[in-house]
């Protein structure tokens, strides 16, 4: 929240919201949190409250179970468009009035859509909490969705989609996800496609809103300077009419279909973009879902492979061979398994070599046990990164929301650093088969005419014109 933090920067620099400055040894302990207060209001609207009084700030994070994977076929981007429209008018306030109110409070209002959820965040000074709760209720319960704002927001999103189309790095990842999930709702980007966003109607927005923005699908997490009993009263009063309001509208059914099978063997797809002088490289397969029992070992393993500044992929691709300025790998977990993805780029002339080095690096990582110092460094870095990542109220709110949405126990959060620190070399060996190498999808976003000779060693592969993705 830029405006508030500017005014309270000196205080914020001294405040230790959770752990304070962290060393790996200090961070490798259970996260101690004040008592978390739970409440269930009318309509099964659930609230989690964590009081923190070091700063006069409150973070409100309202999350709905239903993200871009709930977009109907042909309406990709509908969840994101609906969330963006919330700030353009609600109740008696139009977009300009909402913006002025948020600005006058020095607050920050945002929305975010991922595959599984839609989130509305509001960060305010604690003295403005009553107004903030009232505004949040209006945004969720009484959005205007005016035709004028729909068209304005549509133009903004189409401009953002144009940016994706013109950015090879973003477009490459879109192509990878499309190829990996092959028609599954996880396969399309949260922004949707130009064709689908262009056609969304106000009635479709209204129907999506009525089906998803419902108390029984909602989780409100509050972290900061407030009294739990007072906040509960504020929320209960502001959202009192919500259950009755949605009772006449059916909830949107959001059962995810089964995932497609993992990529078997080596599948190479070239997305042809004429004129590119650099090629984008994406390599991976399906990973794991939220709540994976072996997550701690997989996190540490990935840190050593491509999740840290001194990882194997960085060393081999950037440091030792100067093939690229960057290389990384990551797992992303959703309700169903998200992707494991290796990401890098290089100039056209070294594309074949860079793909080969990336694949060989993964293969060696799976075949050769880590040296003790490499293992310790990866484990300590993983612990420290987690500890520093839960220091802010926003991060805590996001973690508590994750527990609610995915039905995880509190210990999943409080014991996370302990589990990371408890990972042993044999645990890494046990999860190495989960990191794909023999069975991988390779997506190259490149000028095929400039790189075709280098790809002959990979046998048959598919060439797709980039317009197949950017014109959807």
Image: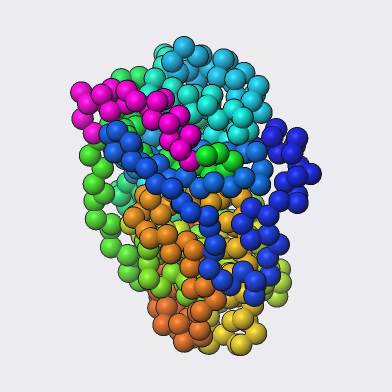
* The magenta stretch spans residue 238: yes
The quadrant in which the C terminus is found is top left
- Residue at the outermost right position: 10
Q: Magenta span covers which residues?
A: 228-251
Left or right: 243, with 370 as reference point = left
Q: Is residue 271 visible?
A: no
Residue at image position (62%, 69%) is: 27
Q: Position of residue 4 (x, y in %)?
A: 69, 34
Residue at image position (34%, 25%) is: 240
Q: Magenta residues: mostly which secondary structure?
A: helix
Q: Quadrant of residue 292?
A: bottom left
Left or right: 240, with 129 as reference point = left
Q: Nearer the viewer, residue 201 or 213?
A: 213
Give the colouring mode of the picture. rainbow
Q: Is residue 206 visible?
A: yes
The quadrant in which the N terminus is found is top right
In the image, residue 4 sits, relative to residue 170, either above or below, namely above
Q: Position of residue 127 (x, y in %)?
A: 61, 30
Q: Nearer the viewer, residue 391 or 157?
A: 391
* The magenta stretch spans residue 428: no
Residue at image position (54%, 46%) is: 51
Q: Nearer the viewer, residue 249 or 16?
A: 16
Residue at image position (49%, 28%) is: 133
């Amino acid at each position: 929240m830029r405006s508030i933090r500017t005014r309270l920067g000196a205080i914020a620099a001294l405040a230790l919201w959770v752990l304070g400055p962290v060393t790996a040894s200090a961070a490798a302990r259970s996260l101690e949190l004040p008592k978390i207060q739970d409440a269930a209001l009318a309509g099964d609207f659930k609230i989690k409250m964590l009081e923190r009084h070091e700063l006069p700030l409150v973070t409100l994070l309202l999350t709905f179970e239903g993200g871009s994977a709930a977009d109907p076929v042909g309406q990709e981007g509908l969840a994101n468009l609906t969330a963006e429209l919330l700030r353009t008018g609600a109740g008696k306030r139009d977009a300009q009035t909402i913006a002025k109110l948020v600005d006058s409070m020095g607050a920050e209002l945002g929305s975010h859509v991922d595959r599984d959820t839609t989130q509305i965040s509001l960060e305010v000074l604690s003295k403005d909490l009553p107004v903030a709760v009232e505004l949040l209720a209006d945004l969720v319960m009484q959005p205007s969705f005016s035709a004028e704002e729909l068209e304005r927001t549509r133009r903004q999103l189409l401009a953002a989609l144009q940016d994706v189309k013109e950015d090879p790095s973003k477009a490459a990842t879109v192509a990878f996800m499309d190829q990996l999930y092959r028609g599954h709702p996880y396969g399309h980007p949260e922004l949707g496609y130009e064709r689908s966003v262009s056609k969304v109607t106000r009635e479709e927005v209204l129907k999506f809103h009525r089906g998803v923005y419902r108390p029984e699908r909602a989780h409100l997490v509050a972290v900061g300077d407030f009294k739990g009993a007072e906040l509960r009263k504020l929320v209960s009063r502001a959202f009192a009419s919500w259950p009755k309001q949605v009772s006449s509208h059916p909830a949107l059914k959001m059962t995810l279909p089964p995932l497609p099978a993992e990529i078997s063997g080596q599948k190479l797809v070239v997305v042809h973009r004429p004129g590119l002088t650099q090629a984008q490289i994406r390599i991976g397969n399906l990973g794991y879902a939220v709540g994976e029992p072996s997550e701690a070992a997989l996190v540490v393993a990935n840190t050593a492979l491509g999740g840290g500044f001194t990882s194997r992929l960085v060393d081999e691709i950037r440091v030792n061979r100067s093939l690229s300025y960057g290389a990384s790998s990551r797992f992303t977990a959703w309700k169903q398994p998200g992707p494991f993805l290796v990401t890098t780029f290089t100039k056209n002339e070294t594309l074949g070599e860079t793909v080969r080095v990336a694949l060989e690096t993964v293969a060696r990582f799976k075949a050769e046990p880590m040296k003790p110092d490499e293992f310790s460094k990866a484990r300590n870095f993983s612990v420290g990164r987690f500890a520093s990542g839960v220091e802010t109220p926003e991060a805590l709110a996001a973690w508590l929301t994750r527990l609610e949405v995915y039905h995880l126990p509190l210990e999943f959060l409080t014991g996370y650093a302990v589990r990371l620190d408890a990972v042993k070399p044999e645990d890494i060996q046990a999860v190495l088969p989960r990191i794909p190498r023999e069975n991988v999808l390779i997506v190259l976003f490149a000028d095929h005419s400039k790189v075709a000779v280098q790809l002959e060693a990979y046998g048959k592969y598919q060439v797709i014109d980039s317009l197949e993705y950017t014109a959807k």
